[in-house]
Amino acid sequence: MPDFKSIKHQVVQLPAFNNPKKTKTIVFDLDETLIHCVDDAETDNPDVVIPITFSDDPEPVMAGINIRPHIYDCLEIANKYF
């Protein structure tokens, strides 16, 4: 197990509760749940293309991402309860 100092930069700050009746937090897995990464950003017609830079290569890789259907509706409904 890594020590906390080495992973402290990965801590996620959740927003303050906006409703005292909401006592639970829901966490979605980002990839394959909310979005889906495409194999080829140039030919697969993704919804969004973002540059990803790897430490050993100064040239960014263009990553294509598709946003899952109905995810905005899902998040709005989940926000009412979580």
Image (cartoon, rainbow, N blue to C red):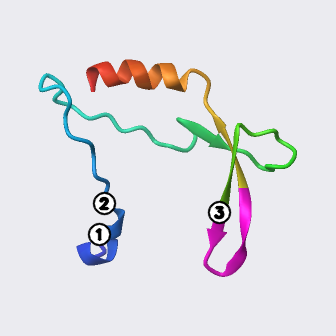
Left or right: where 7 falls relative to 22 = right
In the image, residue 63 above or below residue 55 = above
Secondary structure found at label 2: loop
Q: Amino acid at mark 1?
A: Lys
Give the residue at mark 3.
52
**Residue nearest the observer in this picture, 29 or 51:** 51
Asked whether disc 2 touches disc 3, contact meaning CB atoms under 8 Å apart, the reply is no
Outermost residue on the bottom side: it is 56
Q: Position of residue 5 (x, y in %)?
A: 26, 77
Residue found 16% across the figure and 29% down from its top: 23
Q: Residues within 10 Å of mark 1 (few under 14, many from 20)?
A: few
Give the residue at mark 1.
8
- Ranked by sequence position, the earlier of labels 2 and 3 is 2
Asked whether disc 1 touches disc 3, contact meaning CB atoms under 8 Å apart, the reply is no
Residue found 73% across the figure and 63% down from its top: 61
Q: Residues within 10 Å of mark 3 (few under 14, many from 20)?
A: few
Secondary structure found at label 1: helix
Which of the image's four quarters has the C terminus?
Answer: top left
CA gap, disc 2 and disc 1: 6 Å
Q: Amino acid at mark 2?
A: Val
Give the residue at mark 2.
11
Q: Position of residue 14 (x, y in %)?
A: 27, 46
Query: Which residues, given as a range, are shown in magenta?
Result: 52-62
CA gap, disc 2 and disc 3: 21 Å
- The kind of secondary structure the magenta stretch mainly shows is strand
Q: Amino acid at mark 3?
A: Ile
- Ranked by sequence position, the earlier of labels 1 and 3 is 1
Secondary structure found at label 3: strand
